[in-house]
Amino acid sequence: MKKDWKPGTMIYPLPALLISCGDSPENYNLFTVSWAGTICSNPAMCYISVRPERHSYGIIKRNMEFVINLTTEDMAFATDWCGVRSGRDHHKFEEMKLTPGKSLMVAAPYVEESPLCIECRVKEIIGLGSHDMFIADVLNVKADERFLQAGTDKFELDTANPLVYVHGAYYSLGKKIGKFGWSVEKKTNTNKQ
């Protein structure tokens, strides 16, 4: 038996992300977003949804650039803190002891402590209601070499203990149960998920 609820945002889990923005150290800022995702693979594009009253909204709208920084269990406190404190009142990089790195393709800094940083340039802003969606081209990705599989370009984010958000709470990922396409692979005694 299922109960009907009012329409709401119940697609979980989502990544818990730190978004960095600003074009100089004086206006660098960080804020937490979970309403984000991939929207196209060729060309590589993604989006973040941001409330217009957020301090970073104006910074991103002015500069039309940002960096998506994936987070880890080790970054959980900073990830939450940056989502409940305003850049109007706090220097978040400094207060959370996070290191702004110089991005290759955008003026916005990336977070050195993040395992994966995605440099983005805004292509379009769509007003949706409580949030505006910033649709962006992915210009560059910075991957921490510690999580690259030796001898390949395969990024193993699971070994970084990524942080996810589920309806008001943060979690780490559980155990691996399969890989893409495992349900249709020919099964042999040597096949492993």
Image (cartoon, rainbow, N blue to C red):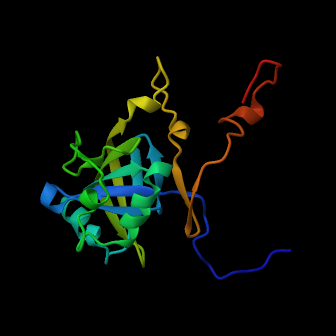
Q: Is residue 151 left or right of residue 92?
A: right
Say whether residue 72 is visible: no
Which is more toward the observer, 120 or 28?
A: 28
Instruction: Report the residue at 27% width, 48% height from top.
Output: 99
**Rendering coords of residue 175 (x, y %):** 68, 42
Q: How many marks?
A: 0
Q: Quadrant of the N terminus?
A: bottom right
**Rendering coords of residue 61 (x, y %):** 24, 65
Q: Is residue 188 left or right of residue 102?
A: right
Q: Is residue 179 above or below residue 129?
A: above
**Rendering coords of residue 92 (x, y %):** 28, 62
Q: Is residue 141 above or below residue 89?
A: above
Which is more toward the observer, 52 or 24?
A: 24
In the picture, residue 143 is in which quadrant? top left
Q: Quadrant of the C terminus?
A: top right
Instruction: Report the residue at 81% width, 24% height from top.
Output: 187
Which is more toward the observer, 96 or 165?
A: 96
Say whether residue 68 is visible: yes
Instruction: Report the residue at 33% width, 48% height from top.
Output: 137
In the picture, residue 169 is in which quadrant? bottom right
**Rendering coords of residue 59 (x, y %):** 22, 65
Q: Is residue 189 above or below residue 11?
A: above
